[in-house]
Image (cartoon, grey):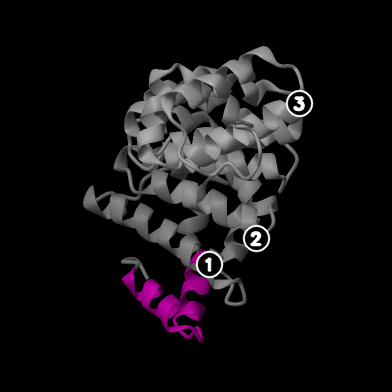
């Protein structure tokens, strides 16, 4: 049976998973590697398989392929890790790749399939607070990807930042990040709703975290050019006032939910 044929959608049994993993370890053929990763990745969408692949030692085998210079193989490996990362126990084994994935996301071609796949994996890995601190030193760079990326990239970076923004332990790290002032253009009325609402939710989450600790009243000090100085400066306040009159009801409602405005 050809387990690497694209049409192989059935759930694999342990023996078939083992064969695929052996294939991944033993072949240098990029076409076979890519197809094997796709098959494993598709099967890792099923919770039972997420466990089988881990128990058969598959995570390091898949993980090693994110070093492959072939961008398509790299992307497929990231996609497979992304599906595997839905399982919390798998995350413990996948976290060893987080720093490299961050590096690749930041250095990789902007808006590329590899960058998006990396961002999706990082988003999955930060759904809980367990591994979020591993991203601390990359936050400024992630904001750079956010402001320079296209619509799809912006949405994916925002999903990741939203995960971080829900964790009070990450608030200062977010607010301390040096962020280009063009970030505020995400709060313009004409910005697509899927981006605008997420940018507003980011502001809402951070403000809530600060308010819970009664810190906004205490005028916290963050450096010039930081996210804090952007979010709580005059320009942002003006944008919020304008958004109160936005044509979309969801946007209007979101603005009213942000305590400071």
* Image position of 182 with respect to 104: above or below: below
* Residues at circles 1 and 2 in contact by the CB criterion of under 8 Å: yes
Q: Is residue 223 left or right of residue 252?
A: right
Q: Earlier in the sequence, mark 3 or mark 2?
A: 3
Q: Which residues are magenta?
A: 236-257
Image coords of residue 210 (percent x, y): 30, 50
**Label located before the other in sequence (1 or 2):** 2
Residue under circle 1? 194
Q: CA distance from mark 3 to mark 2?
A: 31 Å
Q: Secondary structure at mark 2?
A: helix
Query: Is residue 238 highlighted in magenta?
Result: yes
Q: Is 70 contained in the magenta span? A: no
Residue at (43, 51) in percent of width and height: 162
Q: Tell me, for residue 30, which label it has, or none.
A: 3
User: Quadrant of the rendered structure where residue 252 is?
Assistant: bottom left
Residue 192: percent from left, percent from top = 59, 71
Give the number of the mark in front: 1 or 3: 3
Q: Residues within 10 Å of mark 2 (few under 14, many from 20)?
A: some
Query: Circle 2 is placed at which residue position?
Result: 151
């Amino acid at each position: 049976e050809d387990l690497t044929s694209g049409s192989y959608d059935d759930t694999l049994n342990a023996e078939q998973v083992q064969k695929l993993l052996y294939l991944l370890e033993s072949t240098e053929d990029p076409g076979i590697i890519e197809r094997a990763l796709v098959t494993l990745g598709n099967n890792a969408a099923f919770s039972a398989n997420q466990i089988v692949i881990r128990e058969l030692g598959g995570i390091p085998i898949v993980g090693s392929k994110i070093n492959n210079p072939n961008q398509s193989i790299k992307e497929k490996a990231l996609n497979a890790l992304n599906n595997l990362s839905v399982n919390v126990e798998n995350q413990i084994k996948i976290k060893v790749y987080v720093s490299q994935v961050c590096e690749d996301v930041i250095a990789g071609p902007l808006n590329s399939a590899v960058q998006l796949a990396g961002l999706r994996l990082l988003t999955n890995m930060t759904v809980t607070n367990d591994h979020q601190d591993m991203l601390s030193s990359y936050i400024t760079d992630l904001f750079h990807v956010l402001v320079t990326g296209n619509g799809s990239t912006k949405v994916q970076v925002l999903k990741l930042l939203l995960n971080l923004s829900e964790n009070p332990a990450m608030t200062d790290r977010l607010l301390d990040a040096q962020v280009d002032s063009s970030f505020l253009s995400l709060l313009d009325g004409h910005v697509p709703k899927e981006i605008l609402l997420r940018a507003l939710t980011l502001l809402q989450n951070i403000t809530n975290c600060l308010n819970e600790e009664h810190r906004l009243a205490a005028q916290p000090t963050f450096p010039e050019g930081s996210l804090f100085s952007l979010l709580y400066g005059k320009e942002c306040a003006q944008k919020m006032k304008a958004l109160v009159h936005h044509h979309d009801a969801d946007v209007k409602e979101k603005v009213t939910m942000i305590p400071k405005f």
